[in-house]
Every structure is written in structure tokens, then in C-alpha cells.
Image: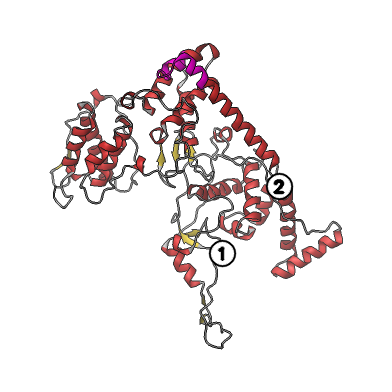
Amino acid sequence: MTSRNDGIQNEIYDRFKQHSGLPEDHFELLRYSIVSHEFLIRRITFVPRPPSRTLEIDDGSIDKHRIDLDAKYLKSDGSEFTLADVPLKSLVAAIEDHIQVYVAEHRRTEVYEMIVEGVRGIKQTPKWGRQVDNPRAKPRTPFSESRDPPESRKTNKVLFESFASASKLRPETLARVRGMIVWCDSERSNGTWGAIEWDTFTVIGGRLGPAEEHTLYDVPNCYVRDRLMASTSLDIEPERRDRVRRIVFSDLTSSQIKQYATAIEEIEIQMAEDKLEKTKKRPAKTKKSQRPRKASDRALMVRRIQLSRKIAPQEAECIMEQEEILDAIDDTICLAPNPSFTARKTRFERPYHFGQEYSVLAPGVLVQKDAEISIPSGDVDRDCDQLRAMIKIFVRNGHWTMDEFIKALHGPRRRQIIDFLEKRGPLQGKQSSVFGRTWVFFKRRELLGYELTAPPPRPSGLTREVRELVKLREVDPNRGKKRPSLETSGGPGKLQKASYY
């Protein structure tokens, strides 16, 4: 192996063929797919590179007989575009995805490491070995982990294909089951989720990273087994359940299958009860109201707001009304994503602005557009009541004021926010622009791994543009740098830095 990586694509591919143990037709079709995809990406330069998606060779979506594997792609100079012209990282990423789908779980890491050994600039640990936040990796029952030998255990792909074949469910039902397994697995340990697009069941973000695509092959095998067992109780008629379970869980005896089904049902019931009990017992987190009851005292409070903020009387009255409406919002409801609402395929109006936008992490800080994370492509996964409760918790118990939150929404005025907050019901307010922009704001924070009440990041954790803006806050635009404070000894002290939050 030379010290440089130039021209080693073919060597990498030969290693893949040598160590993977896959049939020959996989390699020819995968080579064709990688070369053609990269060639088209270079030809159509205005189309952004799509997320890496696994090529499923034997899923029926590709007609091998209609593909000309001998087709050649020519570069502008007339020479052939080959595997050697594919960027090394793109090639390794495609091979890594293929290993994750088709190589047995107990051999994946070994195969990947043999392929990339000694290759500079390529991570020596595969992506499934780099996952640190994996709360569903631990089996929940004695039967969650397959009892077959490692070399003969069903992969996630085989498990789901067995379930699909035996259940005879409609394609849209199977797509929903698969999509929900992946989406639920995207949940981080801190309760934040990824975004799902209900038309394609594509899941972006979550525990793998803010912009990473989450697929069935990223889900722990034990969790896939648990969810498929739960689905046999939810989606299949009672008279057909035993047959489906015997086919899918062929590593278990009949008595073990019954115990497994009972254990999963008990877990599901317990989780539902715990969620309900937590919602009932959770106290409403509201500030003690200092607003008096008498109309004259209320007018006095409005007057105080007006004088303290130096605003018009109408604006002060609007703020007072806003606080009263926030008091009345129930913030004890469950805030987990609502699959039934997501299934409505609710779309939203994308905010339209140029250049810079307000950060979703640091209040009042301008950043370059999409510098933190781009607007997610997906369906709204929380209803109107949930978003109203999230707004209340965010501005009452978090690190943001309502003014900073309104500014970060880019468009809605305070009166529009109030009109949305005073409605009640999961669908009341769905047509408001506040609804879509609020969901985008909270979903972007969620994809970045931030809870509702999480503090803003320190400047070192932000982008370069944000850090520069923070530095500018330490400078008085009229007098230059701030004057140094004086210590008790009379000597010059350190400059007092202004907090950006």
C-alpha cells in the first residue's frame, strides 16, 4: 500500500469482493450504480448531492435485465468515466452501506476494517460502531435477542421481509410499520426525535446526528424484533398471529413465542400507563401570577409594563393579554411526537428570507441562513395544543423571552401569536402561519439535540459567524471598546464581557 490514496479505488473494491462473501452479481450491479450515480452528479452540477441511500439489489425495485452493465460513461475529453474517478469517500460510503445491509451482523465490523485498513483520510471505525447514543440497544426481554448462532441470525432486512411475506398486509400498512420502527428508534436519550416525511417514510436526524438519514439498518436487531412482535398484535387478525410469529421468530419454540408476545404486550401496557401517570402527576409549571384581580389594578399593571418598556399603551395591553393567555395553557400534556397527527401529512409554509436568520439556539443572535441546520423536510409531528404548550414552557422555564422567540420566527407579529395561543384543540390553529413556523423552530432545535429548556451553547460551540457577532457585542458602537472596570485596589481590571444570553 502506498502512502497516498490516489488511484486505489479499484483496490478498495477488490478488497470488498474478497472479504464480503457476497455473490458476484452484487458487485457488478453495485459498481454500475456507484459509477453512474457519481457521473450524473458531476454532469448535473446544480443538483445537490442527495443523502446516501442504500442500494437494495434484491428488493424487486431494480430490474437487472433492463440495466446495461456494459454501458460506458464518457468524460468531456472522451475518456471513460470509471470507478477510479469516483471520490474515495463516496466509494467507501457506498460500500459501508452495502455491508450494513447484506453482511451478517457479527462480520460487519471485521469486513469493513479489512477493506479500509491503511487508507488515509477514511474513518477506520464503521458508522454502526460509532453510535454512542443508542438507548434501544439493550434487549428488553429474554427473547428480544435471537437465539440462533451469530452467523445464521436474521438481519433486520430478512426479519422484515419474513414479516411482510407471512402477514400479507397491504404495502401501505407495511410501509407504515417500517417507518414507525425507524422513526421511534431515532429518539435520543434526552427525548428529542428526528423528522419523518410520511409520503416516503424517510427519517432525518435523531440519535445518529442532525442531518443523518436514519434507516431500518441502523435500528438495533433486538428492537426490530420487539416492534414486529408488537405489530403482530396490532395489525394482524387473531387467527393468523400464531402462524406469522412462527415464521418471523423461527429461532423460538411455540411456548417461547407465547411468552415473548405476553412480555411485549405487558411492556406496551406499562409504557402507556407510565406516560398517562406522568402526565397526570406532572404539575403545571407556571409562574405565580402577580396580576391583580381588580380592573383598576390591572390597568395599573398595564401602565407599569408600558413605562418599563417604553412602548405604546396598545402594545402593553397586548403583552398583558399574552401573559394571561399563557397562564391558561395546559403545559402538562404529553409532548412526544404524535404519529396520528403526522399521518395527516400536514405541510407548512417555509420561511423566506435572505442571507441571515436568527439562531434557534442562541436568542437574538444572527447567523448565516441554514448555518446551524437547514429546515427539515418532513411532516409536522406535533399538534396545535402540543405546540402551544411548548411555547409556554420555552418562554416561561427556558432561557428565551417571548420577544426573542417572536423575532426568531421571522414574520408573525405578537397579535398573531396571541390569536394562535388562545385557541384550544389539536387542530385549532393549523392554518395559521404561526403553527408551521413554530414547528420548524422547535424541530430544528430538536434535530440539533436541544430540549425545550436547554441553555444556549457557549460561543465556542457556535459557528464562526456567531462567535464574531458575540465579540461585536463587547464593543460599544459609539465609544469603541468598553471601559475597564476598577478593582478595589484602584488598578485597572479586566474588561467586562457582555453575555449574549
Residue 74 point in image, percent of width and height: 17, 41
Quadrant of the rendered image containing residue 490: bottom right
> Which residue, given by chain and number where applicable, does mark 2 sit on?
284
**Between 305 and 252, the one nearer to me in the picture:** 252
Residue 238 point in image, percent of width and height: 55, 14
Residue 91 point in image, percent of width and height: 25, 42
The magenta segment is 243-260
Q: Amino acid at mark 2?
A: Ala
Quadrant of the rendered image containing residue 202: top left
Principal SS element in the magenta part? helix
Q: Amino acid at mark 1?
A: Tyr
Q: Is residue 295 left or right of residue 399?
A: right
Residue 501 - label: 1
User: How busy is the neighbourhood of tag 2: few (under 14 within 10 Å), some, or many (20 plus)?
Assistant: some
Could you say whether the residue bearing mark 2 is in a helix, strand or loop?
Answer: loop
Could you say whether the residue bearing mark 1 is in a helix, strand or loop?
Answer: loop
**Between 15 and 396, the one nearer to me in the picture:** 15
Q: Is residue 337 left or right of residue 62?
A: right
Q: Residue at x 24, y 33 (%)?
A: 30
Residue 389 - label: none
> Residue at the bottom extreme?
490
